[in-house]
Amino acid sequence: MLKKLSQNKKKITYNTWLDFIRLLIIFNLPSFFFSFFINKKNLFDGISHTKNSFIAVTNSIFFHRPFPDPFVISIDLLCLTLLVIIIEKQWIKKISYYLVSTLFFYQWYSFFVIFFFNREPNFSTDFYFLTQIQYIIDFKILIIILAFLSLFFVFSKILLNQSKKLFNSQFSNKFKRELSSVLIISIIGLSFLNYELKPNQKEAYFTIIQASTINLIKNIEQSLTKTTTEKLTSRLQIKEKNNVILSERPNIYLMIIESYGDMENILDKANLSLFNKKISSIKNRLIQQNIHSISSYSKHEDSGTFGNINTLMYGQKFNKNDLSKLNDNLIKNFKSPTNSLNYLLKQSNYTTIGFYPSLSEKSLTEMSYSKADFKHFYQFDYVFTGTNIHHINSEQSNWYYPDQLSLNWVGDQLNTNINSPHVMTYISSNSHFPFIIPTKEYSHLNNIEKIKSKKYIALQIDEALKIEKQKYNVMFLREQFNQSFLWKIGRWCYRLWEKQKVLFQKLNYQTRYQKAISYQLDSITTFINKINNKPFILIVTGDHQPHFANQSNFTPLHIISNNKDYLDYWQSTNQFERGFHLNTNKKLATSHKNIANDLLKSLISR
């Protein structure tokens, strides 16, 4: 096994460095306004007038003394950020995060008071001013305050997102040492500047700062170049440009569960409790099999099943109008499918497979594209449909056939006919509307040979699906007509999500939906038994919310593997929690367009 770099800690990257630069730019916006639009002096002139900006801030808050130059607070913000990077302690990160927010607010507060009222800021006086209703009634004052608050909230949101992202990063010890040297020289130099220095002394000091900063940047660039070279030489065999072969090639399964949505917002308390028990049961089964997993949420696009599949495969958002179906125009205009996950993995001799048991050869044609178009667009070597499994050839998609049966079939195919490493994309059937729950009443479907040999069974299955759809539609319409007058009032009174949720709860489809999703997860867990003989990475997520409860754009995301090292990169992004579960913190979320890229990074970082 290849040696890991830095014990799973992220190296400083250009993106992280850019985040740092963006943060500094945002820090200095108030000082820029202050210096050029108010003082009209050089940015460094204000430094010599304040002995210690942290003390000045404290004095302003507690002892009502004049507020310091916003530029000096920018220096405090910079120093604070550097300290957070150098001393990686969680409690320091939390405290610093709130201090940054406070200092940033006082920067804008100082700029606002000086610019609009032409006087020194005093927190006590200004707070009293805001409490006097007769002043706020003044229209001009009100407009000024609203403008200030709008500007502050826009920039503070950007600042807090950038600082939180930066504070959550991890840095190498070498990078910390370099930052420490710049920080120490800066602090010592700034303390000297509190005294009246001669011009040549100031120039000498800034020369030292410049040299130290340049040295830091050079070392960062050398570290980046070295890290990139090490990765390319030790983890990849370079054949030619844009044609690389991974040194380790686990089998990869991208398993998309139809309608697997934000369960906590969809299910009532009773059904959510049952579903959580199912999740816990699956988690225990995985642990018993020595299978490792991490969980998060992923934001999906509002573009239907195939729209989200394309986002997952290509790592980018497609035109919504083109993605409800893969139409001829999109196929013909898609000149170079060389940026897809499948295309890149094929360069490493992966066999690419599409597995869609609810489709048939005819249904592909009815959707305005042929099997050849389908294979070309996704760069599939093989496409397996329901025609391959059951010999069905209906013109419509059929979600009635049990997914467990289909997964058993494809598992046997993978073990007997596919010898090379492979990547398979799968879309479930039974969790699609109208949410089929394979139970004993569907036992006649458990024999593939019987289905293949008797065409009338396929016709019965088509008819059964129609009946299930009608059941749902009748219940749906009945619920609307039963309260038709109230429904019109409710449509106006209630928010859309409340209206749909109330309707959904009165139907018996919460239980049906919950059982359909649970069945899918059970089927995938059983499928793992068939593929566990080789290293694998299995990604389970949803395509979108169920059509009756579309109040969220989050879908659960589970990364599963029989080698926990394959999960290290995902874990290092700080977007996942260990275990198979519904993550309670949706702030720990990624998006569908990032999954393909993160998968490739997880393989390269090995």
Image (cartoon, rainbow, N blue to C red):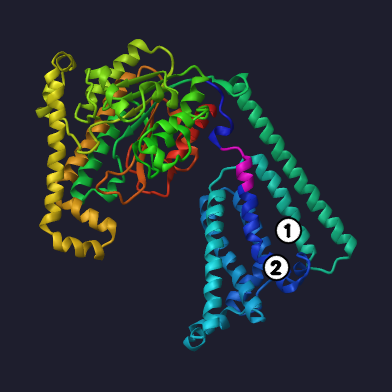
Circle 2 SS class = loop
- Mark drawn on residue 52: 2
> Is 570 colored magenta in this rendering?
no
Percent coordinates x, y for residue 267 in the rendering: 23, 48
Gap in Å between the C-alphas at discs 2 and 1?
A: 10 Å
Q: Quadrant of residue 215?
A: top right
> Dots 2 and 1: beta carbons under 8 Å?
no
Comparing 234 with 55, the one in front is 234
Percent coordinates x, y for residue 252 in the rendering: 41, 24
Q: Amino acid at mark 2?
A: Asn
The stretch in magenta equals: 10-18
Comparing 341 with 156, the one in front is 341
Percent coordinates x, y for residue 451 in the rendering: 16, 18
Name above or below for residue 574 compared with residue 2: below
**Count of numbered tags:** 2
On the question of residue 294 being in view, the answer is no
- Mark drawn on residue 90: none
Sequence-first disc among 2 and 1: 2
Residue occupied by mark 1: 187
* Residue occupying the point 44% across, 29% down: 331
Left-right relation of 201 to 153: right
Neighbourhood count class around disc 2 (C-alpha, 10 Å): few under 14, some 14–19, many 20 upward: some
Q: Quadrant of residue 556?
A: top left
Name above or below for residue 500 compared with residue 261: below
Q: Amino acid at mark 1?
A: Ile
Name above or below for residue 235 compared with residue 46: above
Neighbourhood count class around disc 1 (C-alpha, 10 Å): few under 14, some 14–19, many 20 upward: some
* Residue occupying the point 54% across, 76% down: 145
Comparing 427 with 603, the one in front is 427
Circle 1 SS class = helix
Comparing 583 with 189, the one in front is 583
* Residue occupying the point 64% across, 45% down: 17
